[in-house]
C-alpha cells in the first residue's frame, strides 16, 4: 500500500482528482505568497471590492456578496441562525451526507427542523419538492445544488421556482459546483447561494463566499440570537466599506481576486462551464467503457464530481493506493458508501488532457485488480 507523507521541502507533489480540496495552480500559489496590507487598509478594501464584483458576475446576480473566514459549513450554519425564527419551521432537502449535515446544523441550533430526503443516488425533483412543501408551512428551505458525497446534481433550475411559489426563502449550497456549473441566482430567485473556495475556484481552503438577497437581509433583521461570528448584519455592515468584521485570510482573498479575474476575463464563464461539462461526460464515458455503473440516477450526474459504483467488486482501497503510488489521488466512497463506490473530482483547473492521462492509468490498475 502506498504511503504519502508530509513533504516539508516541496509540498504535495500529487495530482489531485479529488472532490476537494483540489489542485491549486502555480499562478494562484504565487498570488498567495505576495505581501499584503492589513484588513483595515485601503488596498485591502479595494481587493475585497474586486472579489464582491467578481462573485456577482459568476453568480449572475445584483445581490450583495459576502466573504467568510470559514469553510462552507460556516455559511450553512449562518443561514440557519440568521434566517429561521424560533416559531418557524425550516425544511432541509437531503440527497446525501451534506444535506444530512445541514439538517443536523438546524437541529443543533435548536431550530424546528424537518428533513425530507430521497435515497442516496437520487435527486430532489420538482414533484418531490411540491409534495414535501404541501405537508406544512416552511419559512426557509435548504438544498444542495451538487451533493459531493453522491455525485448527484439536483435540478435546481426546476426545483427552486417550485419552492419560491410557496413563499419560502431558498438557501442553496453550491460548494462543489460554484464557478464550475452555471447558477443564475437572480433568475431563479435564490436568497443565499454559498460555497467555499477549495473546489471549483481552485484556491487553498479557509475562505467561503455567498450572495445574499434583500429578502434574506430583511429576514435576518427580524431574527434574534443570530450569534456574533456569522451574523449576516454584522458582515453586511462591514461589507459596506469592503471589509469583514474580523481578520480574514488575506492571502486567499488575494488569490480569489486573481482567480475571478482569470475566470471572467481570460477563460470566460461560458467556456469554463462547458469545460466542466466535458470533464463530466468524459468521466461517465470512461466508467461505461470499464464497466463501472454510475451511482447517481441517470440524468442527474454531476459535472464536477463523479461517483461510480463498485460494480466490478474490486478492492477500492487498493485501487486508490496503487494510483496514489503513481502520483494521482482519487478517493473512496463517502461514509456508508466506502468501498461500495469511489469518487473522481474533475473541477477547477483540470483539463481534458489531465483527465485522460489519469483515467488511462486508472484503467490499467482496474484491469490488474479484476
Image (spheres, rainbow, N blue to C red):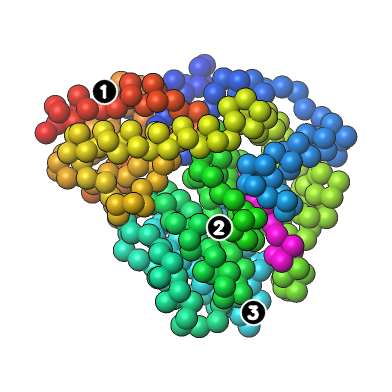
- 134 or 308: nearer the viewer: 134
- 187 or 351: nearer the viewer: 187
Residue visible at 42% across and 48% down in the picture = 148
The percent position of residue 258, horizontal first and vertical second, equals 68, 28
Using a 10 Å C-alpha cutoff, classify the residue at mark 2 as few (fewer than 14 neighbours), some (14 to 19) or many (20 or more). Answer: many
- 359 relative to 93, above or below: above
Image quarter of residue 50: top right
- 35 relative to 111, above or below: above
Q: Which residues are magenta?
A: 208-217
The quadrant of the rendering that contains the N terminus is top left
- 297 or 148: nearer the viewer: 297
The percent position of residue 323, horizontal first and vertical second, equals 28, 27
Does dot 1 land on a helix, a strand or a loop?
helix
Using a 10 Å C-alpha cutoff, classify the residue at mark 3 as few (fewer than 14 neighbours), some (14 to 19) or many (20 or more). Answer: few
| Residue assigned mark 3 | 86
Whether residue 95 appears in this view of the structure is yes
Q: Measure the C-alpha gap from mark 2 to mark 1.
A: 36 Å
Q: Measure the C-alpha gap from mark 3 to mark 1.
A: 54 Å
| Residue assigned mark 1 | 361
The percent position of residue 92, horizontal first and vertical second, equals 49, 68
- 143 or 228: nearer the viewer: 143
Amino acid at each position: 500500500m502506498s504511503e504519502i507523507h508530509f513533504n516539508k521541502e516541496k509540498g504535495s507533489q500529487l495530482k489531485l482528482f479529488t472532490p476537494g480540496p483540489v489542485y491549486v495552480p502555480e499562478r494562484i500559489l504565487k498570488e498567495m505568497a505576495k505581501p499584503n496590507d492589513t484588513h483595515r487598509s485601503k488596498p485591502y478594501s479595494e481587493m475585497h471590492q474586486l472579489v464582491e464584483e467578481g462573485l456577482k458576475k459568476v453568480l449572475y446576480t445584483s445581490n450583495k456578496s459576502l466573504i467568510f473566514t470559514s469553510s462552507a459549513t460556516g455559511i450553512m450554519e449562518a443561514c440557519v441562525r440568521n434566517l429561521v425564527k424560533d416559531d418557524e419551521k425550516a425544511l432541509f432537502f437531503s440527497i446525501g451526507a451534506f444535506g444530512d449535515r445541514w439538517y443536523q446544523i438546524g437541529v443543533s441550533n435548536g431550530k424546528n427542523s424537518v428533513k425530507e430526503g430521497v435515497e442516496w443516488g437520487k435527486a430532489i425533483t420538482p414533484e418531490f419538492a411540491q409534495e414535501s412543501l404541501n405537508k406544512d408551512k416552511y419559512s426557509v428551505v435548504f438544498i444542495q445544488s451538487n451533493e459531493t458525497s453522491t455525485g448527484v446534481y439536483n435540478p435546481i433550475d426546476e426545483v427552486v421556482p417550485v419552492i419560491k411559489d410557496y413563499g419560502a426563502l431558498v438557501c442553496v449550497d453550491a460548494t462543489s459546483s460554484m464557478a464550475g456549473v452555471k447558477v443564475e441566482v437572480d433568475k431563479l430567485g435564490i436568497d443565499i447561494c454559498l460555497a467555499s473556495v477549495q473546489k471549483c475556484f481552485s484556491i487553498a481552503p479557509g475562505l467561503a463566499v455567498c450572495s445574499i438577497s434583500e429578502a434574506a437581509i430583511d429576514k435576518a433583521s427580524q431574527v434574534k440570537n443570530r450569534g456574533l461570528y456569522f451574523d449576516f448584519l454584522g458582515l453586511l455592515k462591514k461589507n459596506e466599506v469592503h471589509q469583514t468584521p474580523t481578520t480574514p485570510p488575506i492571502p486567499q482573498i488575494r488569490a480569489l481576486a486573481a482567480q475571478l479575474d482569470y475566470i471572467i476575463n481570460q477563460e470566460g464563464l461560458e467556456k469554463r462551464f462547458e469545460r466542466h461539462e466535458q470533464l463530466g461526460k468524459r468521466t461517465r464515458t470512461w466508467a461505461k467503457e470499464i464497466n463501472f455503473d454510475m451511482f447517481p440516477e441517470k440524468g442527474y450526474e454531476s459535472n464536477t464530481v463523479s461517483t461510480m459504483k463498485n460494480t466490478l467488486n474490486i478492492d477500492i482501497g487498493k485501487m486508490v493506493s496503487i494510483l496514489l503510488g503513481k502520483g494521482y489521488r482519487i478517493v473512496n466512497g463517502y461514509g456508508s458508501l466506502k468501498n461500495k463506490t469511489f469518487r473522481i473530482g474533475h473541477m477547477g483547473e483540470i483539463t481534458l488532457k489531465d483527465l485522460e492521462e489519469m483515467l488511462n492509468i486508472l484503467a490499467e490498475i482496474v484491469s490488474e485488480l479484476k
